[in-house]
Amino acid sequence: MQSETPSNTAPTDKSLYEQLRAWVLIGFQSFGGGMATLALIQRSFVEDRGWIKMEEFTRMWGVCQLAPGINLIALAMLIGRKLGGGVGVAIALVGMLLPSVSITLIMTAIYSAIRGSAQVQAALRAVIPATIGIGLVTAIKIAIPLLRQGWKRGRGITLFSILTLCASGLALGLLRMPVIVILLAAGLLNGIAFSVLNTVDSVTETGEAAV
């Protein structure tokens, strides 16, 4: 797993040109669906350039889960606003969407002509496991900062976060609950658990201090 610290050769300039350049590169490489593009954004702004900390990136992505529509667009807008305000938002949207939309149109035209090929169908089937692998690695990278923060606040918070992760997966996969219901329930339960566990910790520390 790559370090979150930007490399020595990574650009630290946050000028509008550098922001546009970063988004255009992402737009040209955003193959493989949402998780692959999320991995590109995380690598570009967290690992390569160090413009955003992993913890902040994770919080932004969490907020985007509650927003309707395409989450990646919401994430691009949040990052763009942080780095360049309103202009940064425009740069993020144009830089990421224009190349990817152009490539999609070209590939759609090409695919229409060769979609009956057995080789093409085999290649498309091979892309699926690769995309799943990228998604798993990205999910792990996003989860690690949350678990670290929970561990610092107490083992109870960490345990509850792990239980929430498992329960959310079961609710979606087995019970087929709506995603928005799962997210709202997870947020509400974690907020209550955090308050209760903090209160317990405070009482415990007060008691130990008195002794």
Image (cartoon, rainbow, N blue to C red):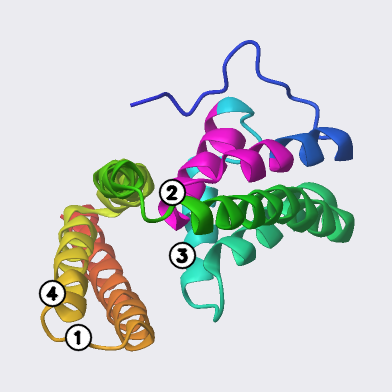
Q: Is residue 173 left or right of residue 184?
A: left
Rendered residue at 35%/42% (across/down): 141
Vertical order, 56 against 207 (above or below): above
Circle 1 — which element? loop
- Residue 40: within the magenta? yes
Q: Is residue 148 visible?
A: no
Most frequent secondary structure within the magenta stretch? helix
Between the C-alphas of marks 3 and 2, the distance is 21 Å
Dot 4 and dot 1 residues touching (CB under 8 Å): no
Vertical order, 148 against 79 (above or below): above
Write down the residue under mark 3.
Answer: 62
Q: Is residue 62 left or right of residue 135?
A: right
Closest to the camera, between mark 4 and mark 1, is: 1
Q: Earlier in the sequence, mark 1 or mark 3?
A: 3
Residue 57 x/y as whole percent = 53, 50
Q: Is residue 160 left or right of residue 14?
A: left
Write down the residue under mark 2.
Answer: 32
